[in-house]
Image (cartoon, rainbow, N blue to C red):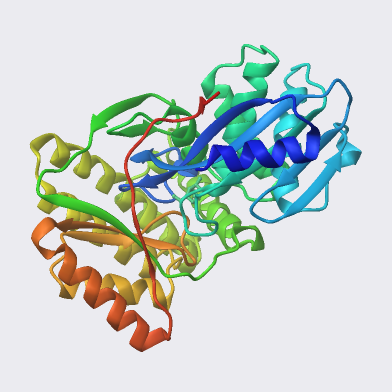
């Protein structure tokens, strides 16, 4: 990220007194998809792609924002009625509102932001933006909010100001990321453990289908409703089941006649996925990347056939990966487009990337995008 460009734009719009600069990253997720809002486990890591913002308090009640990459500006107040029109503005507004709801005393500020987290690629650009502002305002106003609550502020922003009933994974990863480590996160208790992740002899690559997903148009929220519904039906017989994370496939089978086929499939995927995360965790401890990879393919299959959040382009890239002998490959993030994450033996890497590009281009008439990511630190102040 070019901080000088942000600095120059800031000076241009708001005068020469510089502000402070903060950044917060996007994330990858090794495994554990759609498990977070089911109280389950996820295995994300922050990456070397961030949303970066320069911010200076302005002593008014107004927030003035420049979205550098979009070449757009917005100005809005801090009251509920002041919500801006632009989606990107609502992320910043929502963070402010959620801080205020938690009795955080904040006022207006001037800000310029820019980022290199690809939008709509399943790398959580929106969580990165929320985390940047939550982290920065907490610091600038000395609010003393801990990082757990900052993550919840970002999540609540999605729920209340964007309309996506997301889990906690993305915001958590963006705030708690640690260079060289992925984290096993229990999304119910928020207990987490860091795992060094530097598989010798393997590379990690993200292949972007360049198909954009729009999570707010409800397919995401609908999946969540299905899961919560099935959990509540199982709970009638097994009161200990708070989330699907607590359910077993046997419990699910017991209620088969009481839920729709579609809801059954959704729950089946989630229960299996929670188990896959556990399996990957012990495989990682053994350094057994073959098993890690096999589970990744399992996730893809489940997300495609049972959870139905894949698409033709993602399935296509997944098939190519299999054909090329890639160790593990799957759709990453919410689905409905975006990237596959691929764990590849170094000696197969070039051949796979070449084949994936050529075949994808022949089939869809466009190239996928390749991202190599470095697992990096979470939210931080740059200057
Ligand atoms: C999106 C959501 C996350 C999570 C993933 C799927 O990224 O924001 O909370 O549910 O999808 O694992």
x then y, percent, for residue 182: 30, 36
Among the 4 quarters of the image, the one containing residue 120 = bottom right
Residue at point 39%, 24% (across, down) = 191
Q: Relative to 271, is 222 on the left or the right?
A: right
x then y, percent, for residue 24: 52, 35
Q: Relative to 133, is 275 on the left or the right?
A: left
In the image, is residue 352 above or below residue 273? Answer: below
Viewer-closest of 329 and 231 = 329
Q: Relative to 51, is 184 on the left or the right?
A: left
Among the 4 quarters of the image, the one containing residue 214 = bottom right
Viewer-closest of 16 and 103 = 16
In the image, is residue 334 above or below residue 381? Answer: below
Tell me the quadrant of the picture where the C terminus can be found: top right
Viewer-closest of 144 and 256 = 144
Query: Total label count?
Result: 0
Residue 349 in view here: yes
Residue at point 82%, 22% (across, down) = 107
Residue 154 in view here: no
Among the 4 quarters of the image, the one containing residue 140 = top right
Q: Relative to 190, is 158 on the left or the right?
A: right
Residue at point 27%, 33% (across, down) = 180
Residue at point 65%, 63% (across, down) = 217
x then y, percent, for residue 206: 34, 58
x then y, percent, for residue 267: 42, 55
């Amino acid at each position: 990220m070019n901080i000088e460009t942000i600095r120059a734009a800031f000076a241009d719009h708001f005068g020469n007194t510089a502000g402070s600069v903060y950044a917060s990253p996007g994330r990858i997720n090794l495994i554990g998809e759609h498990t977070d809002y089911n109280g389950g486990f996820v295995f994300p890591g922050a990456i070397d792609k961030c949303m970066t913002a320069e911010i200076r308090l302005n002593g008014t009640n107004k927030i003035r924002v420049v979205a550098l990459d979009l070449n757009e500006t917005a100005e809005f107040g801090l009251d509920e009625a002041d919500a801006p029109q632009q989606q990107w503005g609502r992320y910043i507004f929502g963070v402010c509102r959620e801080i205020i709801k938690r009795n955080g005393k904040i006022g207006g500020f001037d800000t310029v932001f820019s980022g290199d987290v690809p939008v709509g690629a399943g790398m959580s650009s929106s969580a990165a933006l929320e985390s940047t502002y939550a982290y920065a305002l907490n610091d600038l106003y000395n609010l003393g909010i801990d990082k757990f609550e900052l993550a919840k502020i970002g999540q609540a922003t999605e729920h209340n100001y964007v309309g996506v009933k997301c889990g906690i994974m993305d915001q958590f990863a963006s705030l708690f990321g640690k260079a060289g480590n992925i984290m096993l996160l229990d999304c119910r208790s928020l207990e987490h453990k860091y795992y060094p992740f530097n598989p010798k002899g393997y590379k990690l690559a993200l292949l972007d289908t360049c198909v954009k997903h729009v999570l707010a148009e409800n397919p995401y929220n609908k999946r969540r409703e299905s899961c919560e519904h099935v959990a509540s039906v199982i709970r009638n017989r097994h009161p200990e089941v708070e989330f699907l994370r607590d359910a077993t496939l046997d419990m699910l089978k017991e209620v088969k006649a009481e839920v729709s086929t579609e809801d059954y499939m959704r729950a089946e995927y989630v229960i299996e996925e929670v188990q896959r995360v556990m399996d990957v965790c012990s495989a990682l401890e053994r350094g057994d990347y073959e098993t890690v990879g096999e589970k990744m393919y399992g996730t893809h299959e489940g997300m495609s056939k049972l959870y139905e959040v894949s698409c033709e382009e993602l399935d296509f890239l997944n098939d190519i990966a299999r054909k090329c002998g890639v160790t593990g490959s799957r759709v990453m993030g919410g689905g409905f487009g975006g990237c596959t994450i691929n764990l590849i033996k170094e000696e197969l890497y070039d051949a796979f990337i070449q084949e994936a590009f050529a075949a994808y281009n022949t089939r869809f008439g466009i190239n996928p995008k390749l991202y190599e990511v470095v697992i990096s630190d979470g939210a931080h102040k740059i200057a």
